[in-house]
Image (cartoon, rainbow, N blue to C red):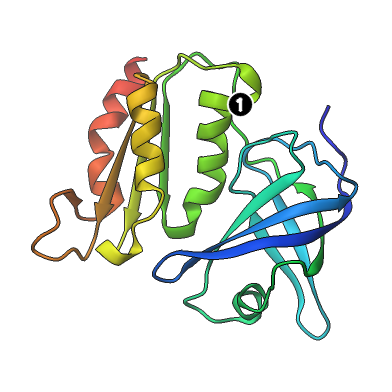
Amino acid sequence: MIDKPKTYTATVSSVVNVAGKFYVAKLRLVEPKEIQFLAGQYVICKIGPPKGNHTLSIASAPNPDGTIELLQSVAPMGEGSKWLLGLKPGQTVQFLGPLGKFILQKQSPRPKVFVATGCGIAPLRSMIMDELTGQGTESNKQMTLYWGLRHEEDVFWKEEFETLAKKHQNFRFIITLSQPSEVWKGARGRVTAHITHEITQLQQA
């Protein structure tokens, strides 16, 4: 059963700079102590007047351990970025959730192709982890992730996705950089240039 949107109180477990401008905040729920959500949903963090609210997708898969992870790019340095950078371990925060209908169609047998740039990876990471390792059920559907970033220093979660790809033969991922250095050995260019060949395959599936 998925929870109806309501206000949750949580404490900050950590705020980690995972790469360049990207930070991950891990929150532990206090009241209620657990949240039931669908992978891909988001929460609205209450960052207080005059700053208002800040919307962030849940980057972690649904789990019973009473924690969620939120991904933020602080490059714009708006009020939401300043709020997240100011969080300290043990600090109390509130958010409204779960919200959103951007979720995976689990019943469909068709191959899954995920496409993201930057922080857009957050809800897709939640979906992929939920499909491959969530709640004791493993999917055998073919899944491909295309993730576009700019520079090498922007790359994170690469080892995590590599581990998933080694463990699950039905999952593969491609990280492509639009502004790589000469030493970058991975895919280059905008992410849209790398998914063209998938279109025909999906139409035939």
Tag 1's secondary structure?
A: helix
**What residue is at 23 percent from the left and 47 percent from the top?**
193
**Relative to 14, 197 lies left or right:** left
**What residue is at 62 percent from the left and 18 percent from the top?**
136
Give residue 205's quadrant in the image. Answer: top left
**Relative to 145, 195 lies left or right:** left
Residue 126 higher or lower than 50, as above or below: above
Give residue 25's quadrant in the image. Answer: bottom right
Residue 121 placement (x, y as % from top left): 47, 49
Residue 64 placement (x, y as % from top left): 75, 33
Q: Residue 12 or 170: which is nearer the viewer?
A: 12
**What residue is at 17 percent from the left and 48 percent from the top?**
186
Name the outermost residue toward the bottom: 50
Quadrant where the N terminus is found in the figure: top right
Residue 187 higher or lower than 65, as above or below: below
Residue 3 higher or lower than 78, as above or below: above
Residue 175 placement (x, y as % from top left): 29, 47
Residue 168 higher or lower than 88, as above or below: above
Q: Residue 196 or 161: which is nearer the viewer?
A: 161
Q: Is residue 124 visible?
A: yes
Residue 107 placement (x, y as % from top left): 60, 16
Q: Residue 100 or 46: which is nearer the viewer?
A: 46
Q: Residues within 10 Å of mark 1 (few under 14, many from 20)?
A: some
Tally of numbered discs:
1
Q: Is residue 144 visible?
A: no
Q: Which amino acid type is shown beneath numbered disc 1?
A: Gly
**Relative to 26, 90 lies left or right:** right
Name the residue beneath numbered marker 1.
134
**Relative to 201, 118 lies left or right:** right
